[in-house]
Every structure is written in structure tokens, then in C-alpha cells.
Amino acid sequence: MKTIILKAVSDKQYLINRKYWFLLTSTCRLIAKRLRLSSTADAKRYAGSAFSYSISFGDTKMRSTIGTIALTTFVFFSSTLHADVRCGQSRPSKQDVERSTANLDTANFLNHIRDEFAGDFKGYAVILTGAAGQRLGFRREGWAVDPCDATGVRFDLNTESAIGSVTKLFTTVAVLKATNDQARLQRPLTDFLPFRWWSLADPFYNTVTIEKLLQHKGGFVKSGGGKHITTRLADGRERSATDYASMPRFYSNTSMGIFHFIYAKYAFYSTTFLNPKSLHDVEVEHQYSGLNTYNSEVQEVTSAAFNHGLYTQILKPLHISATCDARIKKFPLPSSIKSPPNPPIEHFHFSSVARSYASPSDSDGTLLSSSMQNCAAGGLYMSTKDLAKFAASLGDNSFLPEASQNLMMNSGPEDNLYAFSTIQAEGGRAFWQNGKRSENGNVSYAVLIRFSSGATAVFIANSDNDSTNTLNTIRDAYNMARI
């Protein structure tokens, strides 16, 4: 497309001859019909480049002609996008402005999302929620399952998809809600390790508190390179002393992922909750077993405890669904959890699980692998509707005490926030977390933003796109909606 437009711009005779004009417009139509091979942003950019180039010509007719070509190209791409047909089915979409507030024009927000994300994802859904917790509006577009891949399932508000590192917000809330003993946040992570792991851990980790883990100050590098957590703990601080001193906060999956192993003792330590199967009993039973056997048995129990914490502290109170394994369409609570003494189990079953795709044009999607044994850092699947409910609850004192809210969202240094990062938006600082989970090039992506007004926006998609642009686009949509 770019080559055709630039040739048109550079060759006056090419433009004057009508047969080439029709050839150009016919080519635009053909390329537009195959829009899935090129992003909408590229189409707009090429058209914009041609129009900008046209104004450099002194000839009025020439400027007009090239400008018309640019406009025609843009229209072809835009109109074809909305009429996109795959395997006999048109690309589904729906947008609903349910209400606006005195400070937010919901239509402006959704229209900006529609225009900027058109054709950029296999499927997506976005929900804007007001400060009082009421849903203001939503947009959903595209496919949860490509019609060429199977029977075709539209992506809607109930579609469950992987949310990647947005899971870290759930882990943080589960930790904060586990106990009213705020002093426990200042205890070192080694206090809550399985016994044999504690004896293996480098002394540095006696200085890493629960709070530091939640602030991404655990001293871990971003990726462990496949090493087991016991090896990494034994190796000591992974970041250099200089790096750690100059920038203590460093995004690492392990800082949150380790809660899959330490939550059992942290949350169930001297509380009325009973571990599904006593970690102490497992440690005693396998104290003389090989380390691999010990690790396997311990991880099964600590995983059950973590999942139990997510369920009892978040999913059940909010009546929302999630899973760490998309093939098991309910939250993975093991059969060893019984009641009494534990609360009765009420599963909120999934209904429509999205496949993950490499790109909007990909027709060979997949379900991502199970994270049942290590879900804390980024393993959850859930729907946009339920994620919006969780996001709104972060400002609800009856769900999350104000003191805990202030640890996650405040006006102080970003380095001290639990889990969240910040971005500037109209009206002040906004708090955000995004997540991208990828396997063999197949991607699912999510964003959660809480604005200073108390409004929230959540977004889930099931193919790749640039995460920074996605975050900024949602922020910009909010800015445009501000009244």
C-alpha cells in the first residue's frame, strides 16, 4: 500500500491517466478486503502520509487529486473493517452507553476505543465503571474463537481469557485480606517458607519482607531461567548490590509468584482458617525424603492454600469466576478442601473460554497451559465483566479496608505502592496494572486502570498488540471522556 501511494505521489502522469486511477482504487479495495494482513493503524498512517505529501505540491489540482486518493484509501480501509467477513461470518461488535456522569461522557470514551482499536485484536472487550461502582458502558468486538478455527464464538463481556500479570492484583488483595495483623507485612519472607527451604535460603532473604515483595523489591531478576525457587533462594540476591541500591523496585514475576509457596503459612498461621492439609504434617512426613519429592508434596499443599485464599477472600465475596486452568471450567479447589471446618465450596462455572491467538489474522488459536501449581504471578483466566467487578471493589471499604487500599493507591512515591504502577491522566494520578501471557506466540492481554476520580476501566483481548500503546489509548479515551 505504501509503495502504491508513494508511486502515485511521485509520478504525475500516473495520477492523470484515468486507467491508473481506477487501478489504484481497485488495488485499495483488494488490499482492504485483506485487511487482516495489515493493521488499521498502518492504513491510516499511509493515507495520512499521502495527504501530507500532497500539500507540498504547488499544483492545486495535484493537491486535490492526491488528497482524494488518501481519503479514498482511508475510507476503503475503514468501511471494509466494519464489513470484515471471515469464513462466512461478519466480525461481531456491540457498543452500549448505559449512562454518563457529571464528569464523564461515556460515548466519547467508547468511541475513542472503537476508533483506535479497530482491527487491532482478534477479539476484545472493555468496560468503563463509575466511581460509585455502576457500569457506565462497554464495547466488545471480534472473536473469542475464530470462525475459521471452529464454529466461531464472539468475544463478549462473559468471555473468559487469560489476564496475565493483572493476576498480581488478586494476589496482593488476597495477602492484604488474609489477616488484620499489619505487623505481619514487616516480617521476612523466610518466616513463611517451608522448613527445608528456609534452611537453604541465603541470609539476604531474611531482609526481604512481605511488604518488599508486594512492592517488587524482592531482589529477584525478571526471569528465573527455569531454575526452581529453592535454587534461586540458595543463590542469594539475583540483582547486583549496586542495582538494588539504586533501584530497589524492579518488576519480577517471582516477587509475586513466591506467594504461591509462602501464602500457606502467611495466611493460615495462628488463624481460625485451617490449611486443607497441614503443611506441617507434610513437612514432617517428608523430612527425610529426597528434596524433589519434598518440593513436589509441599507445592501441592501450598498451591491448594493459595487457591483457597483467592477463593475465600475474593472470588466468593464478589461472586466472580476465575480459574488457573482454562480446561477446568471452575476454580481449582482440590478435593482435600472439605467442610467443615472450611467454608462450603460454591463454584461459579465458566461459560465461554477464549482461545489465544498470535495476531488478529491468526485462525489457529490455543488454550494456554495450566497454572494450577503456580498461579500467583499471572495465571488467572476470567471475564471482562468479572474483572470490572473486582476493579470497582478496590475502592469499597466493605471489601478492602481503607488502610489496605492506601497501601496500593496513594499520592506517595510510586516505588512504595503495593502492586500498582502509575500514569498521569486528567484529574490526577491513575493506578494501573497490565498483563500479557504468551505461549508459542499465542497471546492474551489485559489492562486494569483505576483513575483518581474512582472510575475504573478494564480491558481484555486474546491476541497481541503493543502494551504501552494499549494502556495509553485507554488513558487517552478517559481523558477525552472527561467533562
Image (spheres, rainbow, N blue to C red):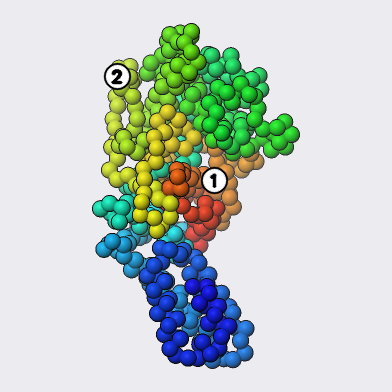
The tag on residue 431 is: 1
Mark 2 or mark 1: whose residue is earlier in sequence: 2
Query: What residue lies at 39% left-to-right and 48% top-to-bottom?
Result: 356
Task: Estimate how packed mark 2 is, as few (under 14), some (14 to 19) or many (20 or more) residues with alpha carbons within 10 Å.
Answer: few
- In percent of the image, x 41 and y 85: which residue is there? 22
Occupied quadrant, residue 60: bottom right
Q: Quadrant of residue 361?
A: bottom left
Which label was assigned to residue 10? none
Residue 175 against residue 101 in the figure, above or below = above
Residue 75 location in percent, x, y?
A: 42, 75
The answer to whether residue 49 shows anywhere in this view is yes
| Amino acid type assigned to the residue bearing label 2 in the image | Ser
Density class for disc 1 (Cα within 10 Å; few <14, some 14-19, many ≥20) is many
- Does residue 166 appear anywhere in the picture? no
Up the image or down, 433 lies above or below 61; here it is above
Q: Could you say where residue 42 lies in the image, as x and y percent from the top left?
A: 50, 67
Q: Is residue 78 above or below residue 483?
A: below
Q: CA distance from mark 2 to mark 1?
A: 38 Å
Image height check: is 8 above or below 476? below
Residue placed most toward the observer, 81 or 172: 81
Give amino acid for label 1. Answer: Phe
* Residue at (55, 78) in percent of width and height: 6
Q: Secondary structure at mark 2?
A: loop
Residue at 42% x, 18% y is 297
Q: Which mark is residue 339?
A: 2
Give coordinates of residue 79: x percent, y percent: 38, 72
Number of marks present in the image shown: 2
Towards the viewer: 48 or 34 = 34
From the viewer's perspective, tell me whether residue 303 is left or right of residue 150: right
The image shows residue 469 at horizontal and vertical percentages of 53, 56
